Amino acid sequence: MVLKFRLKNVFSFRDEITLDLQAAKIQTEKGKALSGNLFTINGEQILKSISMVGANASGKSNVIRGIKACVNMIQSSHTYNENTIFQVAPFKFDGYDKQPSSFYVRFILDEIEYEYSFSLTQTEILTEQLYYYPKGRRSLVFARDETKGPDKTDVYEFRQAIKRPMDVAANTSRKTLFVSRASQMDRDIAKKVFRFFTENIVLDYKESAMPVEDFLKTKKEDILEILNTADSDIVDVKIQGNSLKTFHKSNPDIAFDFDTEESEGTKTLFQMMLGIINVIRNDRTFLMDGIDTNLHPHLVEYIINLFNRSNHAQLIYTAHNTHLLNTDFQRRDQVYFVNKRDDGCSELYSLYDFKDFRDNYDMEKAYLQGRFDAIPYLTTPNI
């Protein structure tokens, strides 16, 4: 599970931003009542969900895009050729387009904490580091600084965690992350890190969707409950032959073909829940941009609460609907705002940073009044 993401000079974020899933020490009555929104590993409390809200074009989606760019680099950089342009764009103003972008992820895997970071331009890797805490103490796995090259022995520093590390370094170009190449070359710790980013962080619910057959055997009641929450009158789902069939309340003996006779909204919701329930069942971290785009607010709240009632699953999402700004189901440290400043760069900050805001205040009202910024300021044009 993820503890922290940091991005710097990535898309609309010029300055470093931090998305922190390590729970704050909230001792209020409401905060304690929402203790189910946390889980504990190695004595550390971790949030199960994080929301990001803000005006249109404020940069909310760029947080998700930045994290996805980081994950995609790890997943794919060992396949890049010399003409590859990385899908990471720096902030475009004030000369920052000539400066590197950087990424940092702190996470826990098999009860061991890791810190992984790298920096790059759009055409080459500049630095890369991996640390871990095998006995509770920070230990270097490797560090890389291409500015010290061209000799690989000057570029890289290793400890004892990777066998024959210079063999990997010799096969790692400036287009490739060392951890990606080391995983490809069967180095154990690199394979663990690589699998974390390819399996534990889910960028698209379609990637995580469980087979329909397995779902109907183990989680059928869950999907029926969700479909009913969406005001559907579907009362049963079955596989008949090679087709998925649905049955409706008005006449539960008549089968409807799911692919051709159900609405696009119902089909989308069904496919989404195949992925989300699998994420929750396997304690993964799921990123979702615009969770409220095509779903009713009650259904969105239901999905968020699925994560908040999970064991160790995590949800990071953006939303527009201010109805979700509600301290009845989320703690103050679970709410982030994204604001576009006058100089064109985006900033990210937590509701928890506003120390004078109390749990009994109306968060939605305060937000719409502009107390936290991150809202559009409109003027009426002369037409």
Image: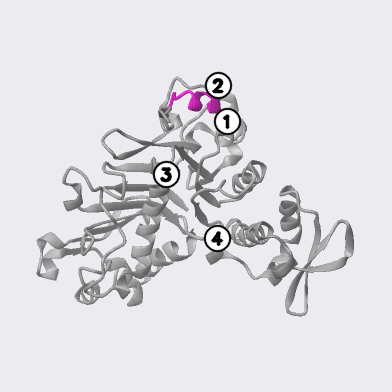
Q: Note whether 367 is above or below 343 in the view shown.
A: above
Which residue bears the numbered disc 2? 361
Discs 2, 4 touching: Cβ within 8 Å: no
Which residue bears the numbered disc 3? 60
Label located before the other in sequence (2 or 4): 4
Side (left or right) of 16 relative to 152: right
Please, what is the three-letter code of the amino acid marked with disc 2? Answer: Tyr
Seen at 45% across and 43% down, the residue is 21
Q: Residue furthest bottom?
A: 241
Which residue bears the numbered disc 1? 327
Please, what is the three-letter code of the amino acid marked with disc 1? Answer: Thr
Q: Position of residue 87 (x, y in %)?
A: 31, 61
Say what secondary structure mark 1 lies in.
loop
Viewer-nearest of discs 1 and 4: 4
Side (left or right) of 11 relative to 95: right
Q: Mark 4 and mark 3: span between their CA atoms?
A: 19 Å
Q: Mark 3 and mark 1: span between their CA atoms?
A: 21 Å
Seen at 13% across and 68% down, the residue is 153
Please, what is the three-letter code of the amino acid marked with disc 3? Answer: Lys
Which quarter of the picture shows residue 261?
bottom right
- Crowding at label 1, few (<14), some or many (≥20) Cα neighbours within 10 Å? many
Question: Relative to the observer, which residue lies in front, 279 or 249?
Answer: 249
